[in-house]
Amino acid sequence: MTFGGKLALFIGGTLFGSAGFKILSSKDARKVYTHVTAAALRCQDEVMKQADLIQESCSDIYADAKQINAEREKKAAAEMIEESAQA
């Protein structure tokens, strides 16, 4: 590629970049960014609510599982005592 070709590519890239920067910093683009950010924040709030619900459910399941195991241990201990009393 010749020097003139490289220079033309550089100038074209600079102009394209400048135009892109102008477009991205326009008031309309700013409104779009604001609305997208607001939607992302709403989404984050909803995800956090769902995560809290899941965590509460898991805590309940864990507590129930511990209670079931405690009852089984009591039952097993009672059976062991009964068996040793019969022997």
Image (cartoon, grey):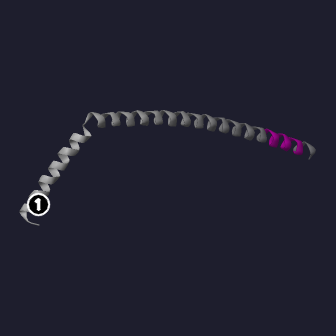
Q: Is residue 5 left or right of residue 31?
A: left
Locate residue 10, reporting x and y percent: 13, 55
What residue would you read off at disc 1?
6
Residue closest to the far left: 3
Q: Nearer the viewer, residue 14 or 66?
A: 14
Magenta segment: 74-83
Q: Name the residue rendered at 85%, 43% in the picture.
A: 79
Locate residue 37, reporting x and y percent: 38, 35
Q: Name the residue rendered at 66%, 38% in the picture.
A: 62
Residue closest to the far bottom: 1
Q: Nearer the viewer, residue 33 or 69?
A: 33
Quadrant including the N terminus: bottom left
Q: Nearer the viewer, residue 80 or 4?
A: 4
Locate residue 24, reporting x and y percent: 26, 40
Q: Name the residue rendered at 58%, 36% in the picture.
A: 55
Q: Secondary structure at mark 1?
A: helix
Q: Name the residue rendered at 84%, 40% in the picture.
A: 78
Q: Is residue 82 left or right of residue 47?
A: right
